[in-house]
Amino acid sequence: MGSDFYLQYILPHAGIIIKICRAYTNSQADFEDYYQEVCLQIWRSKDNFNQQCQWSTWIYRITLNVCLTYLKQSKNGDKHIVSDSLPDEVIDDSKAFANDEINLLYNAIKHLSETDRAVILLYLEEKTYEEIADIIGSNSNNIGVRITRIKSRLTKFINQVD
Amino acid sequence: MSKSIEQMWKDGFVNETQLTAPKINDLYNRKSQNIVDKLQRMFAINIKAIIGGSLVALVMFSLIGAPFLGVYICLLLVPLVLIAKRELGKSYQLSKGLSSYDYIINFNDWLQHSIAVYAGYYKYFYPLLFIGMAVQAVVSDAGGKIIGLMMDVWPTEFLLWGVPYYLLLIIVGLILIVARFSDALYRLDLNIIYGRQFKKLEELIADMQELRK
């Protein structure tokens, strides 16, 4: 990948990629792998970008799709498509961000299903229900209901930990 | 907790420049860990391996005096190469820029179709391979000697191409067993390797479909 492409088209949106990849990984090494994979896939898919959506929306889509279908080699040689349901004891990047509240929030987000993680991340990024539905490929009428349910679960989790 | 999760998010990322992107190392030469790319690579390697394997089989069986079996196996492998090439071509049409649901569904459709096509061919491949090997065994010198010994122990007048009927029945029985279980064997093999991914994919699709209702 040309470094110009990375600097010009990916790096300005690195925040989006970091926020999403962090929600699907449990360690710094995994996070770096996911981040690099997303960059690789954005570069590979750039010719398919048809400008019907914003470049940032395109990046959201690629990042989520990569996170949902990433293959990770685990220690025992077993492979899986996405990050597994998170056992409580394996969270080893609880200091991934400088802000403790964000780390706590991410800890809670990682206990959600893959789809719910995508929904809540887009919501927190202030995407409208229509935009979320468009990126995920769902019905915008259900997004609001789902977000209410997810927020309730997150709040409950955070209150328990707090 | 006094803050809402929205406020926690805003406060936490008030200064986005603090988000440090990891270093990108040799990305151009990096092998993808995305499952679609991984399967594409596997299909491409598979095609080369089948071609190489069929040539090796041809040479090897010729050297041990069974050239027809070598040619036969080569011919059996030709459709497998054509199938793998066709399925690989279809996979290139999958775009990662679609919505997550469309992408996952497209990927799953392609995966299921490919599995069905491969399973359909393996249903015939395994029995036909067994038939070829059985015929070669029967017509070989060693096979002839074994048949001679069997005829000494269990003599019979019912022979077909010089093979006693009970041996033919055993061979036919084994062919039927192989044919009956070839699809299951192929799927068992797939499940051992990819079972966990397939289950995860099913759960993901079910969750997304619920969101679309």
Image: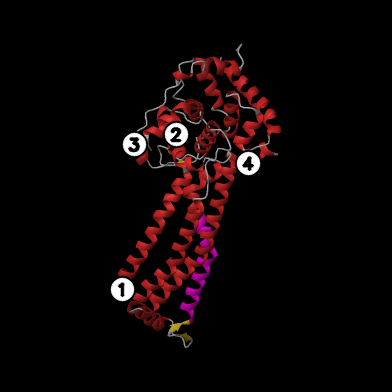
Write down the residue under mark 2. Answer: A34
Q: Chain of mark 1?
A: B
Horizontal side, residue A72 vs residue B65: left or right: right
Does label 1 or label 4 sit earlier along the sequence? Answer: 1
Q: SS class of the residue under badge 1?
A: helix
Horizontal side, residue A131 vs residue B80: left or right: right
Does the rendering let one see residue A91? Answer: yes
Give how far apart the Cα atoms at labels 1 and 3 are: 46 Å
Horizontal side, residue B134 vs residue B188: left or right: left
Same-chain status of marks 1 and 4: yes
Give the magenta part as a residue range: B165-187
x then y, percent, for residue B164: 45, 82
Q: Quadrant of residue A39?
A: top left
State if disc 3 and disc 4 touch (CB < 8 Å): no
Write down the residue under mark 1. Answer: B62
Colour style of the rendered protein structure: secondary structure
How packed is label 3: few (under 14 Cα within 10 Å), some, or many (20 or more)?
A: few
Q: Hey, what amino acid is under mark 2? A: Tyr
Residue located 49% across and 86% down the image: B158
Q: Hey, what amino acid is under mark 3? A: Asp
Q: Nearer the viewer, residue A94 or A54?
A: A54
Write down the residue under mark 3. Answer: B26
